[in-house]
Amino acid sequence: MKDSIKVAIAQIAPIWLSREKTLEKVMTFVTKAADQDAKLIVFGEALVPGYPFWLEQLNGAAFNSSFQKEIHALYSQQAINIEEGQLDSLCELAKEKEISVYLGTIERPSDRGGHSLYCSMIFIDHEGKIKSIHRKLMPTYEERLSWSIGDGHGLITHKLPPFTVGGLNCWENWMPLARAAMYAQGEDLHVSIWPGNKRNTEKLIPVIAQESRSYVMGVSGIFRPMDIPGDLPFSEEMQKVTQSTLADGGSCLAAPDGSWVIEPVVNKEDLIVVEINHKRVREERQNFDPSGHYARPDVLSLSVNRERQSVLK
């Protein structure tokens, strides 16, 4: 077995609130990464069809607002419904190119009625199969005006030889028990995805790397005034209040000792492909392994409910 693989960070802007066009862009970057022999490509949080920046910019908390209802209806229409086959083309491409994908989406799942929205991190393996759908445990601040609360069903890892990979959405990466749940499954390549800002990644990513003794990817989106399409029903209002960049990126990669492999990249769309070596994990686990020789399961243990939550039992 090879001791190293190439991984790809795709720091891109969505074609905001267009599911099909954003997925087309995603697939272009998947192809580019695969052509550079990457075995994993990661995209930012809520990339398809985009992060709900209007909630903060346009008074999303206004109760029973017809304006906010109109925006939400569009957002819901453009969200991903996996059961309807809306990721089939991406899955086929992953299989064709033999590359795994972590994709940040807004999901409108049929198993919760098909109308409420979830911030979902989807893992597609190199055979084109969707292996996990992790719905964000707790939306942050104004996100709760749009996104529903997820569950632990997707708190699982995946084999990506020679690594074991797992991931969390945005501020979930601040949750010690969520991180511990991933470490306990042998995770040694941790993926964190963000809507995009250096302030979110530059301090936390090295800390997670040192805590876990794993490689840690921080993958963010970009969103600038130029990324607001002119044909949305609220384009004019959004453009008036958006005079500066709302998401500047900050994608990065830390080694198992917390040192930078890729320092945070800001203010540009980019595809970054880098080779990582599993030997570095084994070296750093020599003196600290959070779920192995340094754990005390006789004193401390963690219970995780992985049941997919449903109204029907």
Image (cartoon, helix red, strand yellow):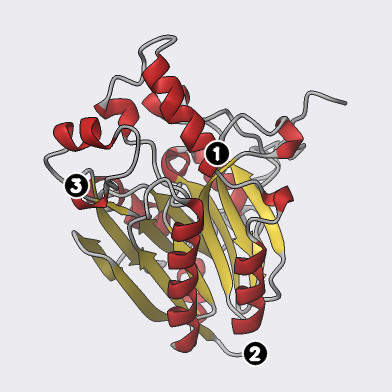
Cα gap from disc 3 to disc 2, whole angstroms: 46 Å
Cα gap from disc 2 to disc 1, whole angstroms: 44 Å
Relative to residue 284, is residue 257 drawn left or right?
A: left
- As drawn, the label of residue 77 is 1
Query: Of label 3 and label 1, which has the lower sequence position?
Result: 1
Mark 1 burial class by Cα count in 10 Å: few <14, some 14-19, many 20+: some
Relative to residue 237, is residue 88 drawn left or right?
A: right
Query: Of label 2 and label 1, which has the lower sequence position?
Result: 2
Relative to residue 89, is residue 225 drawn left or right?
A: left
Residue 291, compared with residue 233, is above or below; it is: below
Quadrant (top left, top right, bottom left, bottom right) of the N terminus: bottom right
- Image coordinates for residue 98, horizontal then vertical, percent: 62, 82
**Any part of residue 155 in sight:** no
Q: Residue at x 68, y 54 (%)?
A: 132
Q: Nearer the viewer, residue 276 or 269?
A: 269
Q: Residue at x 25, y 28 (%)?
A: 57
- Contact flag, marks 3 and 1 (Cβ < 8 Å): no
Residue on which the image places disc 2 = 1
Q: Residue at x 52, y 49 (%)?
A: 105
Quadrant (top left, top right, bottom left, bottom right) of the C terminus: top right
Residue kind at label 3, given as amino acid type: Pro
Residue kind at label 2, given as amino acid type: Met
